[in-house]
Amino acid sequence: MPSALITGASRGLGAAIAAALAPTHTLLLAGRPSAELDAVAAEHGATTWPLDLTDEESLEVSSEVLTELDVLVHNAGVMYPGRVGESSVDEWRATMEVNLIGAVGLTLALLPALRAAGGQVIFINSGSGRNVSAGMASYSASKFALRAFADSLRADEPGLRVTSIHPGRVDTDMQRDLVGYHGGEYDPSTFLRPETVAAVVAQVVATPPDGHTHEVVLRPR
């Protein structure tokens, strides 16, 4: 079976993507070692792949074992809600380190394996990567930059298929934290289910080889 590496797969959307790709792919689940990650891997017969997106040496060492990779799904991300005047440089730096620099570093480290397989790179972006909302300053900036990186990768690597997926709000712990920041009441029925977004990822991966999905925008009904 073709191989797929997923970051941020220990819970939420990442775990749902693992479930969606497990029937058709040999899975590598990347992240910091945890019981949650081990449980998702055991459920789907996957292999865990120790990784710290903020550690450049970790990225390089981990990637050395892969000679070919068919699918790379960038799902890991962090968010520090806050308006510009409430934010700190440390929050901006931490956001960029994971959401942008980590994704760039992992892609560069795995580029030889992706080229060898003629692979696909999927970036789980956000509605915040297309439109800015109040209280999302550092997060939106990181997602706009991630979108630009995806576009650059697509232009520079014609042998790869590169897709940015921009879901609206998804029923995850991150969204619970965001609703709490805004002081609202959390209603899961108004959000996309992780399984819905994961199904879209699987559809993109299954696109026939003569097609190339550049971008998907998905919103709750």
Image: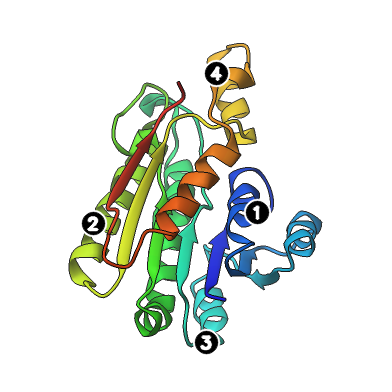
Q: Residues within 10 Å of mark 4 (few under 14, many from 20)?
A: few
Asked if labels 3 and 1 touch by Cβ distance under 8 angstroms, the answer is no
Cα separation between marks 1 and 2: 27 Å
Q: Earlier in the sequence, mark 4 or mark 1?
A: 1
**Quadrant including the C terminus:** top left
**Quadrant including the N terminus:** bottom right
Task: Report the residue at 34% width, 50% height from top.
Answer: 164
Q: Which residue is mark 2?
A: 151
Asked if labels 1 and 4 touch by Cβ distance under 8 angstroms, the answer is no
Amino acid under disc 4: Thr
Q: Disc 1 or disc 3, which is closer to the eye?
A: 1
Q: Residues within 10 Å of mark 1 (few under 14, many from 20)?
A: many
Asked if labels 2 and 3 touch by Cβ distance under 8 angstroms, the answer is no
Residue 136 occupies quadrant: top left
Depth check: 37 or 95 in front?
37
Q: Which residue is mark 3?
A: 64
Question: Left or right of 189: which side holds 117?
Answer: left
Q: Which residue is mark 4?
A: 190
Cα separation between marks 3 and 2: 26 Å
Amino acid under disc 3: Glu
Q: Secondary structure under badge 2?
A: helix
Residue 159 occupies quadrant: bottom left
Task: Report the residue at 55% width, 83% height from top.
Answer: 61
